């Protein structure tokens, strides 16, 4: 996918019919966010315990969660190709309510808060603007839900993700821990005020 086609990507709310596609997308994208030392076994275990179809069915049915997807348009059929249905390139999941992690709850300043729990896109979509479009839509959805602030956790070694979040107005406000495969990872807690006038992000 090229930058020129990114403008055709559609951002929309996920529906119950997306559960299977979201499960597959999560399995493909979660490893991209893991530190290099995370073992394949630990990644597979985390995916099995958090990203099954049944998990996404529950997430989609939860009124405190908002899931958005980035969808590539259907390909038109031609003489050599039957075309293809729209497919998911990325997704975000917002979780409302008090931060469940005690370290995050202490670090996040404003209330009501909403967590940007998941921001994942296929590797082929990196650098195309798909992630930026998802983040803009997610922050708009958080504002519409009445949140005063959005927050997230990101592995301290994930410089690419940290730079992405900083471009979208997130700043570090604390630290927390995240367990993958029995290993405790160190995460930054980052926050973005939703009450300030947003600045354009390209």
Image (spheres, rainbow, N blue to C red):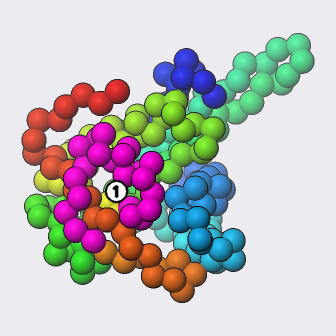
Q: Which residue is mark 1?
A: 116
Quadrant location, the N terminus: top right
Closer to the camera, 59 or 186?
186
Q: Residues within 10 Å of mark 1 (few under 14, many from 20)?
A: many
Image check: 68 left or right of 107?
Answer: right
Q: How many marks?
A: 1
> Is 30 situated above or below 6?
below
> Is 200 situated above or below 162?
above
Residue 189 lies in quadrant: bottom left
> Is 162 situated above or below 169?
below
What residue is at 23 percent from the left and 58 percent from the top?
172
Helix, strand or loop at label 1? It is strand
Magenta region:
154-175
Closer to the camera, 149 or 177?
177
Residue 172 lies in the magenta stretch: yes
What residue is at 88 percent from the left and 13 percent from the top?
79
Residue 28 placement (x, y as % from top left): 65, 55
Residue sitting at the far right: 80
The answer to whether any part of residue 69 appears in the image is: yes
What residue is at 60 percent from the left and 24 percent from the top?
2
Residue sitting at the far bottom: 182
Image check: 191 left or right of 80?
Answer: left
Quadrant location, the C terminus: top left
Residue 120 lies in the magenta stretch: no
Residue 64 placement (x, y as % from top left): 32, 63
């Amino acid at each position: 996918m090229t930058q020129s086609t990114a403008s055709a990507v559609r951002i929309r709310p996920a529906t119950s019919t997306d559960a299977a596609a979201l499960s597959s997308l999560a399995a493909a994208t979660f490893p991209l966010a893991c530190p290099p030392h995370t073992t394949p076994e630990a990644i597979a275990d985390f995916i099995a315990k958090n990203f099954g179809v049944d998990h996404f069915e529950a997430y989609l049915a939860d009124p405190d969660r908002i899931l958005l997807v980035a969808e590539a348009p259907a390909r038109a059929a031609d003489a050599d190709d039957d075309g293809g249905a729209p497919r998911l390139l990325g997704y975000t999941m917002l979780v409302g309510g008090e931060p469940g992690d005690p370290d995050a709850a202490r670090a996040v300043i404003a209330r009501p808060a909403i967590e940007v729990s998941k921001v994942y896109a296929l590797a082929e979509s990196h650098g195309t603007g798909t992630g930026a479009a998802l983040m803009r839509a997610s922050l708009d959805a958080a504002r519409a839900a009445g949140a005063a602030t959005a927050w997230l956790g990101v592995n301290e070694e994930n410089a690419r993700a940290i730079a992405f979040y900083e471009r979208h107005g997130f700043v570090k406000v604390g630290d927390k821990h995240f367990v993958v495969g029995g290993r405790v990872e160190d995460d930054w807690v980052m926050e973005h005020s939703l009450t300030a006038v947003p600045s354009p992000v390209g």
